[in-house]
Amino acid sequence: MKPAIEPIDFRGLAAWRLHGPRGASAVVSRLGGQVLSWITPDGRERLFLSGRAVLDGSAPIRGGIPVCFPQFAAQGSLPKHGFVRTRPWDEAAARAGDGYALLTLATADDEATRALWPHAFRLELTVMLEADRLDLELCVTNPGEAPLAFTGALHTYLRTVQVEDAALEGLYGFSYIDATAGGRRVRETGTEIAVDRETDRIYCGVSRPQLLKAGNLSLGIQAQGFPDVVVWNPWVERCAALADMPPDGWRHMLCVEAAAAEQPVTVAPGEEWAGRQTLVAV
């Protein structure tokens, strides 16, 4: 099938399916502007989507690549990870060419968002699918008359067969904020990060790509514009407390997120900011 984009129903959600080269595909939900699936030409699903994810719009969707804006986690007075994960996004552009399919979705402030956060904004998320590569770019535009400051992330859930057998390279030497240790700041001394317990870390000012080594599901991960990398796995007890995760969900996922979490990004009136995450099957 040639690269193409088609509107679909995905488990009751309005969505788009991107058909890429050599059988690659991706699914993007209108709810949250969220990538829910990425299948590479080998037929393997590369993203984790919880089998218990809430898909009726009453809560954020657990899995895929949620967009967190204008607040990362609980670092402020807004709902956790902001409010755009449960908002509808509209198609702004769609095209397919020789070797790629590209979809851009957009959302903007309205009366409901301004009641929570009194700022004008426009977000565009561009998803580009190639054979072995998925690119996401988030663009934040400030159409208002005052500076706009935000934190946020592309909260990417990567699928693993067994997270205990996976290892993440590329973060040696960077300091991280450890949420499981009361926000203590630690310098990473390992060349590989193995997950063997609850892990919730903000690696700050990361300037290198990462490699998730997970057998034949290995992925290269690179960010641009986003200064931080968040690594998260809830492990057994925390996962059991999440109603929208199966008891063994922790085993099949690792979040490696492109984030602006340590310090807010400020966008001047009339200006824009963009951040990108690229995933490559290796």
Image (cartoon, rainbow, N blue to C red):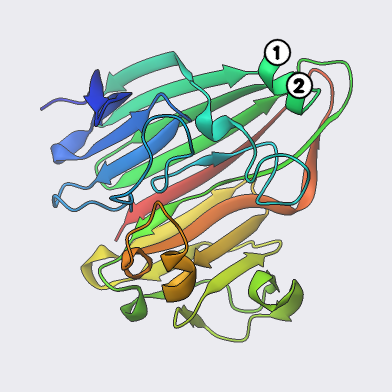
Residue sitting farthest toward the left: 1
> Does 16 sit above or below residue 209?
above
Q: Quadrant of residue 239?
A: bottom left
Residue 88 bears which disc, if any? none
Image coordinates for residue 25, horizontal then vertical, percent = 23, 37
Near mark 1 (Cα within 10 A), the count class, few <14, some 14-19 or many ≥20, is: few
The three-letter code of the residue at mark 2 reads: Ala
Q: Which residue is mark 2?
A: 115
Taking the image as shown, residue 205 lies to the left or right of residue 103, namely right
Q: Are marks 2 and 1 in contact (CB under 8 Å)?
A: yes
The three-letter code of the residue at mark 1 reads: Glu
From the viewer's side, name the closer residue of 217 and 70.
70
> Does 268 sit above or below residue 94?
below
Residue 109 appears in view: no
Secondary element under disc 2, as helix, strand or loop, is helix
Image coordinates for residue 147, horizontal then vertical, percent = 87, 27
What residue is shown at x 66% (from left), y 40% (from top)? Answer: 79
Near mark 2 (Cα within 10 A), the count class, few <14, some 14-19 or many ≥20, is: few
What residue is shown at x 35% (from left), y 79% (from top)? Answer: 164
For the C terminus, give its image quadrant.
bottom left
From the viewer's side, name the closer residue of 14 and 42.
14
Q: Which residue is mark 1?
A: 111
Label 2 and label 1: CA atoms lie apart by 6 Å
Image coordinates for residue 203, horizontal then vertical, percent = 65, 66
Taking the image as shown, residue 76 lies to the left or right of residue 180, namely right
Q: How many marks?
A: 2
Residue 131 appears in view: yes
From the viewer's side, name the closer residue of 63 and 279.
63
Image coordinates for residue 196, horizontal then vertical, percent = 44, 83
What residue is shown at x 47% (from left), y 63% (from top)? Answer: 241
What residue is shown at x 71% (from left), y 61% (from top)? Answer: 205
